Amino acid sequence: MKAEQDADLIEEDSPQDNASINKYSSILPPASPEEEDEAFSTTYFEEKVPIPGNIDQVFSFRKLWAFTGPGFLMSIAYLDPGNIESDLQSGAKAGFKLLWVLLGATIIGLLLQRLAARLGVVTGMHLAEVCNRQYPTVPRIILWLMVELAIIGSDMQEVIGCAIAFNLLSVGRIPLWAGVLITITDTFVFLFLDKYGLRKLEAFFGILITTMALSFGYEYVLVKPDQAEVLKGMFVPYCSGCGHVQLTQAVGIVGAVIMPHNIYLHSALVKSRDIDRKNKREVKEANKYYFIESTIALFISFLINVFVVAVFAEAFYNKTNMEVNQECNATGFPHTDLFPLNNDTLEVDIYKGGVVLGCFFGPAALYIWAIGILAAGQSSTMTGTYSGQFVMEGFLNLKWSRFARVLLTRSIAITPTLLVAIFQDVQHLTGMNDFLNVLQSMQLPFALIPILTFTSLTSIMNDFANGLVWKISGGVVVLVVCAINMYFVVVYVTTLGSTLLYVVAALLSVAYLCFVAYLAWYCLVALGVSCLDFGSRLGLSRHTDIYLLNDMDADMMVER
């Protein structure tokens, strides 16, 4: 049956039948056409957006509009509550000095998202599906578990952000535990929006992004940061007078911006456009427009992040708890107990950030801040749910309804969050964000290494495989990002202050590094380091769908 399917593909691509030079042999999805149609009938693919044809211009706004959507959904991960908290802490601790780190991290993120989009466009499969096809069973299951862990960690941050937003908007009348419970129901409600059409769903996400831009933009205009300092911090890669605190914060920015499950998400979202993957011109054109769209989307997300950093850098950099306490008392604002009467430097999070804005700039600043946080949490929650669905379907070939998927991940995410909200206070709840950022930082190699591996293989990407420059630069980027985030993890672990936790962390680190080394070996083979190509001695070559260097083109598959 498989050979017949492959023979059909070859017949369709044969020179006798198709003389067009734009035709080329694309790889097959791992399913039959019937199964592929079924896959498109679930999770975001109930309809495909048509692309306008017969447009010969080098650039067409009509076509760009048709491709607009996936990049903006992807960019929401750059605006989740974890990112917002990292932004405000950066401004409060380092002023404008780390804006260049935010810019660099966003550019790196754009390059990685480019690879993810190209994989989905060229192969017709998203990253989880390709991992399922290429890795052996045990590594595949481990990889799935690691990515699920990252998604659950991100979901917890979004739950925390929404709960805090509800608490701030209700002036404390909605307790944190009630806010946590509310996020269960509203997520289900919003997820039903995609029943009204893909473009309407994408428009709704656009409204949420606009809400964040207006909310945090209002704070920016209200505070009036020094524009010269903003530009200097953005384009001068230097941090004068910075110490360990600022270095740790810079590492935290990179960890918060580049999120592992977002790579998997973007590679799946690009499948929502009607592209003939056998037409090389259409594939090339899709890659171009998706890159333009992603650039615009991440530029907007970068501006929103800059708004937050600049507001807290201008208003609260080097402020002490005593100064904030006195200001809150003078304006009659509640929650002065959050700021002890000492001269320690102000420590802020997304909850304290709203309170401080209210103390210094009035209640409107607090409420508008809370609306922005709520929009960030809600939008990130929904994209996280889609990420989980794609990952589960791709790695396990397991198709769940959105309802069941949300119920599972949200239950896992809400249980610890709800316990902390009930038995602890808001400081402990927001303090969980540090641990969750570390958790997601540890999962980064499990997205970055596979995406670089598969986009570098001509057997998978054909003419669109990474060239030498992209292989080298991509390898350096992955290495640097992983090293930065491992430093972030080490810094966090050293603050635990428990010998038992040190021992447990050391044992887990050994297993973790072994698995990362395994993925890195596969990646190096894909990048052309032939001296490491000893797969035949490991018996991998017997599994033609597993060993990476086995050609996936149709003619080779028929020969087998």
Image (cartoon, rainbow, N blue to C red):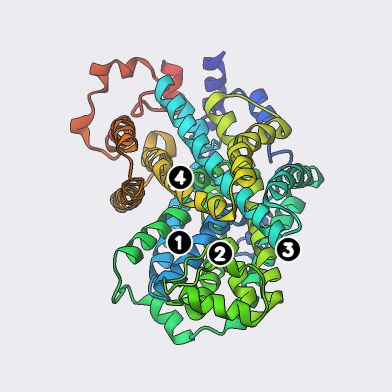
**Does 108 sit above or below residue 437?**
below
Q: Disc 2 vs disc 1: Cβ atoms closer than 8 Å?
A: yes
State the separation of the CA atoms marked 4 and 3.
29 Å
In the rendered view, tell whether residue 540 sits above or below residue 501: above
Q: Nearer the viewer, mark 2 or mark 4?
A: 4
Quarter occupied by residue 533: top left
**The disc labelled 1 sits on which kind of residue?**
Thr
Mark 4 or 3: the one toward you? 3
Looking at the figure, which quarter contains the C terminus?
A: top left
Q: Earlier in the sequence, mark 1 or mark 4?
A: 1
Whichever of callouts 2 and 3 sits on the residue coming sooner in the sequence is 3
Q: From mark 3 to mark 1, how far is it between C-alphas?
A: 30 Å
Look at the numbered disc 2 and give the secondary structure of its residue: helix
Any part of residue 278 in sight: no
Q: Which residue is mark 2?
A: 301
Label 3 crowd (10 A; few <14 / some 14-19 / many >=20)? some
Residue drawn at the location 60% of the way across and 43% of the way down = 417
Q: Which mark is residue 84?
A: none
Residue 106 is tagged as 1
Q: Is residue 261 above or below residue 96?
A: above
